[in-house]
């Protein structure tokens, strides 16, 4: 359990019922698995269609990243506003900025041609 989870719940891990602990761990594992899968998909997109210079992949990675970071931002901000817990909402804003920056660079690479 992350420190902000403890803040939001208002209990230590040992004070939480066993069934709720199982659910919290399962949700955290599901989010971790989803992140690994997304990372693997982006890696494949970068290694194959991006290196071939296919324009659609730039938009796919950009839009997927913005949707992911947008939802993560909204969810963590909602928890912060509802509980005053120190959620990492600001990191998802930074992620969105970095995705936008990467997308901008990828458009420049397309014009110049990708060297592989």
Image (cartoon, rainbow, N blue to C red):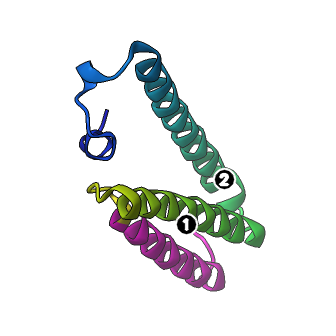
Neighbours of disc 1 within 10 Å: few (<14), some (14-19), many (20+): some
Q: Quadrant of the N terminus?
A: top left
Residue found 61% across the figure and 55% down from its top? 46
Dominant secondary structure (helix, strand or loop) of the stretch shown in magenta: helix
Pointer 1 residue: 70
Residue 30 spot, x, y in % from top left: 55, 31
Residue 65, how many percent across, how many down? Answer: 58, 62
Residue 80 in sight: yes
Residue 112 covered by magenta stretch:
yes
Q: Residue 45 shows which numbered tag?
A: 2
As helix, strand or loop, the secondary structure at mark 2 comes to helix
Tell which of 74 and 108 is nearer to you.
74
Report how far apart the C-alphas of labels 1 and 2 lie in the structure: 21 Å
Q: Secondary structure at mark 1?
A: helix
Q: Which residues are magenta?
A: 90-116
81 in relation to 9, above or below: below
**Which residue does the image show at 51% across and 64% down from the upper left?**
74
| Vertical arrangement, residue 1 with respect to residue 89, above or below | above
Name the residue located 45 percent from the left edge and 28 percent from the top edge.
24
In this view, the residue in front, 51 or 65, is 65
Which label's residue is closer to the chain start, 1 or 2?
Answer: 2
Where residue 100 appears, x then y in whole percent? 51, 77
């Amino acid at each position: 359990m992350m420190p902000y989870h403890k803040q939001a719940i208002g209990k230590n891990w040992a004070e939480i019922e066993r069934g709720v602990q199982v659910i919290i761990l399962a949700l955290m594992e599901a989010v971790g698995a989803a992140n690994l899968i997304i990372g693997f998909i982006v890696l494949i997109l970068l290694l194959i269609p991006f290196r071939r210079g296919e324009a659609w992949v730039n938009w796919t990675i950009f839009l997927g990243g913005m949707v992911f970071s947008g939802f993560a931002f909204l969810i963590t901000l909602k928890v912060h506003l509802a509980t005053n817990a120190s959620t990492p909402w600001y990191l998802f804003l930074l992620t969105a900025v970095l995705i936008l920056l990467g997308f901008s660079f990828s458009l420049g690479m397309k014009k110049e041609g990708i060297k592989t």
